[in-house]
Every structure is written in structure tokens, then in C-alpha cells.
Image: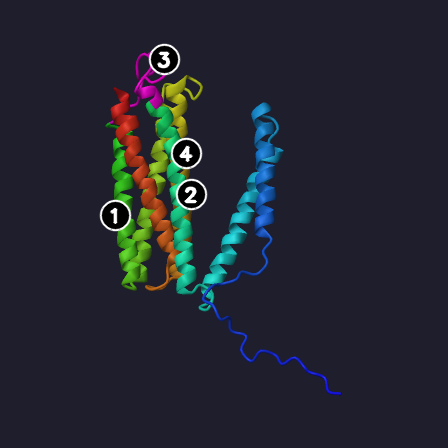
Amino acid sequence: MTHAHATPHPDDTPHHPYHLVDPSPWPLVGGLSAGILAWGAVGYFHDHARTGGLYTGLALIVITMIGWWRDVVREGGDGHSHTPEVRHGLKVGMALFIASEVMFFVAFFWAFFNGALKVSPGISQWPPAGIQVLDTWHIPFVNTLILMSSGLTLSRAHHALVADHRALSTRWLLLTIALGGVFLSLQVHEYGQALFAFTGGMYPSVFYMATGFHGFHVFVGVCFLAVCQLRIARGDFTPERHVGFEAASWYWHFVDAVWIFLFVWVYWWGNG
């Protein structure tokens, strides 16, 4: 009696254009880290001396981000992993993420217009009495010029990369990062000049939440662009393949657009 022997497949090459990732610990680590961060934040809000859980959660989140994105960068370095279909999927994912960020800021604008349009019966004037607003045409206007300029320099960096001028692209990108740093420095200085506290009522709460979260997004964008600059310098991106840079560019232009809305409605129109 003869026995049939399994014949190995002569071609182990996948017959589809999609990249199936290897088992990764980062989703589990990231979920646990977020839970520890939330638990630590609640403890800190109740007692400012309880900072252990908060800092531990933050550290674990940072470790997760570095490790997870490192693996994605390594996958992208394999010419057979990030196929055109995979790159398209990454772009769609980034677009959906930005769409969720739009709705995040919509909530703050909703709260702002609820007060500014006097929808609430408890508000008779806007800004409320006793609130000394910041000068629209001082730091806010300067920061607007800085962010709009950073959008132009980022576009120049992108065009240089597409033209395969890496040195020029890194210089324009470095200027963009520097402009983002100047913006954050001026915003911190502006907060130091503000004569109202976060707990001073509806106007201060909405102002600090909206502009503060925008500032955090600028910080994230600066980090995003800094990583892209390193990747350009070491040759990870090519004129045809630079999804990471495109994602950072989309994110930065979104941050610019949000600031335009903040400047026009919160700093200008909202100041009465």
C-alpha cells in the first residue's frame, strides 16, 4: 500500500497584495497602558500627590508608540510589504483619523458658540463680565502668521522630496519644525499673560480646552515631522514611496486649519 505524501507548495509568495502583519504585543500593551493612565489620572485629580500611576501610564504609552511605529517603519522598509494597496489603506486610515479629530474639535466649538450666541439662558453677554480677553492682534495674530508660514514651508519640503532633492527637503522640514516650536513657545507665553484662570467660568474653560488641545496637536505634529526628517535623511522615503511623510503633512495642514477657525471665532469674533 502506498502512502500519499504532502507536496510543499512550490511558491511561498502570497497571492494577494495585502500585508498580513506578524503577531504583535503592542495592541495588548497599549490597551493596558491606557487603562493604567486613566486610573492614574483619576487618582491624580483626587489627590495631586498621587502621581505614580499617571507617570507610569504616560511612560508606557510612549513606549508603546515608539515600539509600534518602529515596527511599522520596519515593515515599510520591506519592498514587498507596503504594496500600493497597503499604502492606500494607510492613507485611508489617516484620513479617517483626521475626520475623528475634526469631530473632537467640533465639540469645543459647539460649547463656545453655545455661550457666544447666548443660547444658554444663564449667559447675557459674551465675553462674560469680568473677563479681560487677550489682544487679538498681538500674539494670536503673530501665531497665525507663523502657522500659515509653516504650511508653506512644509509644502516646499514635500515638493523637494518628490523631486528627489533630499537635502533641500530636510532644510525646509527643519524650518517647519522650528516654526512649530516658536508657535508653542508663544502660546505658553500667552497663557502666562492671561488674566483669567481655567476655573473662571465658561469662557476660560472653553478657551483653554480648545487652544490647549490645539497646542497639544501642534506638539504631536512637531514630533511627527521630526521623525519624518530623520527618515528622509537616512533614505527611508523615496519620491514614489513616502506615505509617512504624506500622513504627517495632512496632519499638519489639519492643525493649521483648526487654528484659522480658532483665531477667527475665538480670538477675533469672540472677543466682542
Between discs 2 and 3, the one toward the N terminus: 3
Could you tell me which secondary element the residue under label 2 belongs to?
helix
Residue 178 in percent (x, y) is at 34, 45
Quickly name the residue at label 3.
121
| Callout 4 amino acid | Phe
Could you tell me which secondary element the residue under label 4 belongs to?
helix
User: How many numbered markers are drawn?
Assistant: 4
Q: Nearer the viewer, residue 28 or 225?
A: 28
Q: Is residue 188 visible?
A: no
| Callout 2 amino acid | Val
Between discs 4 and 3, the one toward the N terminus: 3
Query: In front of the other: label 2 or label 3?
Result: 3
Residue 225 versus residue 141 in the image, above or below: below
Do labels 3 and 1 touch, CB within 8 Å? no
Instruction: State how far apart marks 4 and 3 are (Cα).
Output: 28 Å
Residue 133 versus residue 94 in the image, above or below: above
Instruction: State how far apart marks 2 and 3 are (Cα).
Output: 38 Å
Q: Is residue 24 left or right of residue 146?
A: right
Instruction: State how far apart marks 1 and 4 are (Cα).
Output: 23 Å
Check residue 152 in the rendering and tell me which mark sits there, or answer none: 1
- The region drawn magenta spans 114-136
- Which quadrant does the C terminus fall into? top left
Between discs 1 and 4, the one toward the N terminus: 1
Magenta-colored stretch includes residue 120: yes
